[in-house]
Image (cartoon, coloured by chain):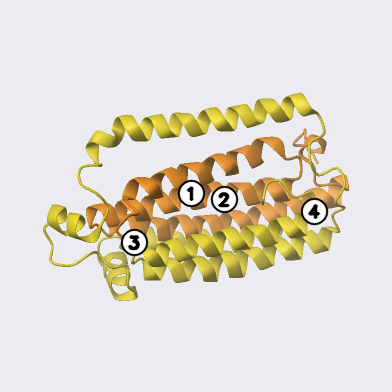
Chain colours: A yellow, B orange
Amino acid sequence: MTVTRRNAVSSVLWLVVAFLGMSALFLGMDAGFIGVIQVLVYAGAIMVLFLFVIMLLNLTPSGLLRVDRPRMKAAGLAAGVAFVALIVAIVTGGALWTRGSGDEAAILARTGSEKLVEGSVLDIADALFTDHLLPFELASVLLLVAIIGAVALTKRRL
Amino acid sequence: MADITTSHYIVLSALIFAVGLFGVVTRKNTVIILMSLELMLNGTNLAFVAFSRHWGNLQGQVFTFFVIAVAAAEAAVALAIIIALNRVRKGVTLDEATELKG
C-alpha cells in the first residue's frame, strides 16, 4: 500500500500501519525494547518528519506514479526476481539454521540456556554499554552530525 | 505462536524487502522512494530480530538498534536534501535532479 498510493499523505499513513504491524511482530518475538523503539522512532518521529515535509512541499497527488507501463513491469519483474533470489538463498542456506523449529522448546534445547533471550531494556543496555560501547558512542556522533547537516542543508544562507 | 517458526519471519522479511525494492525502483517522487527505503531497512530489522531469537543471542537486537539510529539520521538528512532540492528545482521528482551542480 505504501508504494502504490498516488497521494503521498495516504502513503505515509499506510507506512505507519506497516511499522505498527512490524512492532507487534517484535513484541511477539520477546523483543520488547526494539518493539517500543520501533513505535517511538518510526511511527512517531520519522512519520512526523515525513508528514511535515510533504505538507511543507505541498505535493500534488497527480503524476506521482510512473506512467510508462513497460518500465513499471520491468521494475516489478526485478523486484520479483530479487524476492525469489532471497527465497532461494534462504532455502539453500537453510541447512545452516533450519535445524529444529522456532518454537520455544526447540530454541531452548538448541541454545542450551534455561530461558529464551529477552530483549528487555536491562538486557539491551547491558549489551550496549559493555560489548558495544564504541559503536554506541559513534551512533550518537552520527546523530549529531545528521542534525547539523539537516540544519545546514535547509538553511537559506549560512 | 508455536506454529510460527523462524522461517516464516525470514520469508516475511524478504517479502517486505522486495516490496520496498519495488517502491524504490518504480516511484518518481523522492519522498516516497525514501519511505520505501525505510521499508527495506525494516525488512532487514525483522530478519535480525528473528535470527536473534532463533540463536538465543542478543547481538541481532543490538544491531537492529543501530540500524534504527542510522535510519533516523538518514531520514533527517535526506528530507533536508529534498527540501533544498525543492527550493532549487521547484519539484521533488528524481528526473529533475540529474545534475549535482546547483
Q: Chain of mark 1?
A: B
Whether residue A140 is visible to the viewer of this picture, yes or no, is no
- Name the residue tied to disc 3: B1
| Parent chain of label 4 | A
Q: Residue at x 20, y 56 (%)?
A: A107
A96 to A33, vertically: above or below? above
User: Is label 4 or label 3 in front?
Assistant: 3
What residue is rendered at 23% in x and 60% in y? A104
Name the residue tied to disc 1.
B43
Q: Give the number of the disc on residue B39.
A: 2
Mark 2 lies on a secondary structure that is helix
Mark 1, residues whose alpha carbon is within 10 Å: few (<14), some, or many (≥20)? many
Q: Earlier in the sequence, mark 3 or mark 1?
A: 3
| Mark 3 residue type | Met
Determine the CA span between mark 2 and mark 4.
18 Å
* Sequence-wise first label, 3 or 2: 3
Location of residue A149 in the rendering, given as x and y in whole percent from the top left corner: 64, 57
Whether label 2 touches label 1, CB < 8 Å: yes
Which quadrant: the C terminus of chain B? top right
